[in-house]
Amino acid sequence: MNEKTSDSNIPGPSPEKEKRFKIIIAGGGTGGHIFPAIAIANALKREKPDTEILFVGAKGKMEMEKVPQAGYKIKGINIAGFNRSSLIKNAGLPFKLVKSFFQVRKILKTFRPDAVIGVGGYSSFPVLRVAQSKGIPTFIHESNSFAGKSNILLGKKATGVFVATDGMEKFFPKEKIRISGNPVRTSISQSTVTKSEGIKFFSLDERKKTVLVFGGSLGAKVINEVVDKGLDDLLNADLQLIWQTGKLYIDQARDRIKGKSGVWVNDFITQMEYAYAAADIVVSRSGAMTVAELCVVKKPVVFVPYPFAAEDHQTVNAMQLVNKKAALMVKNNEANEKLIPLIIDLSKDENRQNELKRNIAALAITDADKKISEEIFKNLVP
């Protein structure tokens, strides 16, 4: 007599192991490309911790230092941008571009990524171009309200294009656009640093108003020169400064502040969350990532847009906030006469400071990195 076998004893199919994804993130050159790239990488790892991530950047650029500091591997390629100030320096560009394509092919063949994400900067173009030629899914993050030429070209074959604002259909195919906002570093978006902790970090005085001045990760010549010239006026107005100069101006700035109290100066601020926490007023360029961070930290800001950015996109970025009474702006060529008096006037006007804080806070997006990682995995998982 045959015994009836219980269905519960019949072994079912073994559960399928979840795929382990390999993703390349390409780009860099400035903090405005590097820090959002790291934020995206962190979000990808949070969602799927087994994901293997490799960065590709330009040799000699700051990503080669900042990415390893964030705990990720990076491969450098020989690529450089067009030098508008010295045509002779562009003589080697064609050779570098050809060499970079060979280097990229080798990296892709060895790493075998499931997807490639481009965040802007010299190195993103050859990496995404080669990936697209091999049928690898590619994604672009365009942080600015005016898209760069490389991204416009790459966008035609991209799987998806993440943008910060609406109205980007004039640059990219409408069906590929995803409005995500710009990813802000977790250390900033989730910071719990208090104002008092920020002031102590820079050895400043809690009784004084603090002005944070920076021109992006590489510094800003005009802003540095104006602050240098107006330093005594700022200090005499009972203000104190956190001044990030960039590498080209640091020696001059250190000489300038000798014998003066109430000024902290360095070429780069590694822990920006402390600087934002300490600041009552911020003076900065208006790169897209800086704008995104300032919305999140809710600070009164005076923008001095870099006028030679492609298509003058920094002025466009700043004006989007100025028109909403969420920021103030001084043109680069007017900074010498207008910037210092405006900072001093603003420091004395609490009502205006509060209005700017309230309006800029309404523009904050804190989950852009999560939106991007979710959309990428949605396109990769069958």
Image (cartoon, helix red, strand yellow):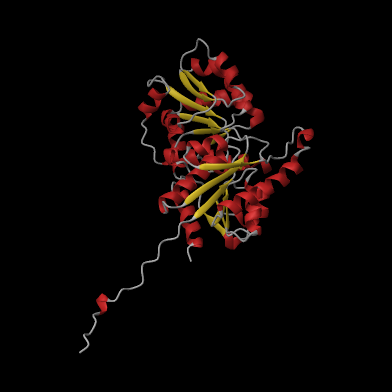
Quadrant of the frame with the N terminus: bottom left
Q: Residue at x 59, y 41 (%)?
A: 28
The quadrant where residue 159 appears: bottom right
Q: Position of residue 47 (x, y in %)?
A: 41, 53
**Residue 339's spot in the image, x, y percent?**
58, 26
Total marks in image: 0
Residue 156 visible, this angle = no
Closest to the observer: 356 or 140? 140
Residue found at the far top of this picture: 259
Where residue 106 appears, as percent x and y from the top left, is 63, 50
Closer to us: 74 or 28: 74
Residue 132 vertical placement versus 29 (above, below): below
Q: Is residue 255 left or right of residue 189?
A: right
Residue farthest toward the bottom in the current orientation of the protein = 1
The residue nearer to you, when weighing 56 against 107, is 107
* Relative to 363, residue 167 above or below: below
From this view, report whether residue 88 is shown above or below residue 259.
below
Which x, y percent locates residue 250? 58, 21
Q: Is residue 8 visible?
A: yes
Left or right placement of residue 321 versus residue 207 in this view: right
Question: Residue sitting at 46 percent across and 45 percent down?
Answer: 364
